[in-house]
Image (cartoon, helix red, strand yellow):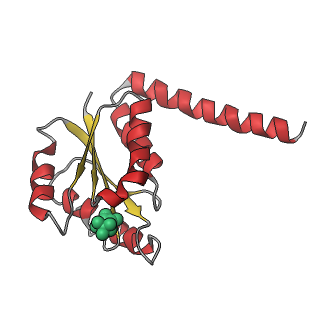
């Protein structure tokens, strides 16, 4: 199975980003985490993205806050799918990062999840891998069913 690269702009992003790692772990999907910044370590970010496909990655997840250019910067240097997580790490509460991440120019796509949407970033990465992995697709289906059952159980308790 291809692995997922989880890149964050700062270690201050880790408490939220860890939820993406935990979600991938729960699905037995291999991943690696790194801290590379589009602004503070642009060369390392670029080299990582340039080599990501040959290094066995299938999807990249990029989490960054404020003027969040990390997902776009990685996407500029690879044709692997890149999923951006805008982080709520400034006085603008993530709206700055959301717009910076989602408003990519034509030709360089970034799939952007919600502000601090680490779990959905991991699930979307898993769904991309599951296009060609039936066993993983079955795990994702089972997860959906378990979540639906949990909601219905809460409904049952509420109305009993
Ligand atoms: C971004 O700036 C990082 O992704 C982080 O969300 C934010 C603040 O970084 P620190 O100043 O906490 O390192 O680049």
Closer to us: 19 or 142: 19
**Residue 55, picture quadrant:** top left
Q: Residue at x 30, y 57 (%)?
A: 11
Rendered-image quadrant of the C terminus? top right
Furthest residue toward bottom: 91
Closer to us: 153 or 91: 91
Q: Is residue 109 above or below residue 105?
A: above
Q: Position of residue 137 (x, y in %)?
A: 44, 28
Closer to us: 7 or 131: 7
Q: Is residue 125 above or below residue 13?
A: above
Q: In which of the image's four quarters is ligand 1 placed?
A: bottom left
Q: In this orientation, does residue 75 appear?
A: yes
Q: Position of residue 86 (x, y in %)?
A: 39, 63
Closer to us: 63 or 75: 63
Q: Residue at x 42, y 38 (%)?
A: 22
Q: Position of residue 42 (x, y in %)?
A: 13, 64
Q: Is residue 34 above or below residue 30?
A: below
Left-right relation of 26 to 58: right
């Amino acid at each position: 199975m291809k692995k997922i690269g989880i890149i964050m702009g700062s270690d201050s992003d880790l408490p939220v980003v860890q939820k993406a790692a935990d979600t991938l772990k729960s699905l037995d999907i291999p991943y690696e985490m790194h801290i590379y910044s589009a602004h503070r370590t642009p060369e390392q970010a670029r080299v990582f993205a340039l080599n990501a496909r040959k290094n066995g990655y299938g999807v990249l997840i990029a989490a960054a806050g404020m003027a969040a250019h990390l997902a776009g910067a990685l996407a500029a240097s690879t044709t692997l799918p890149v999923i951006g997580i805008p982080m709520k790490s400034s006085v603008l509460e993530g709206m700055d990062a959301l717009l910076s991440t989602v408003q990519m120019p034509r030709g360089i796509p970034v799939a952007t999840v919600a502000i601090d949407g680490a779990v959905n970033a991991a699930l979307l990465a898993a769904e991309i891998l599951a296009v060609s992995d039936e066993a993983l697709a079955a795990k994702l289906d089972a997860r959906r069913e378990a979540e639906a059952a949990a909601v219905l159980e809460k409904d049952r308790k509420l109305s009993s």
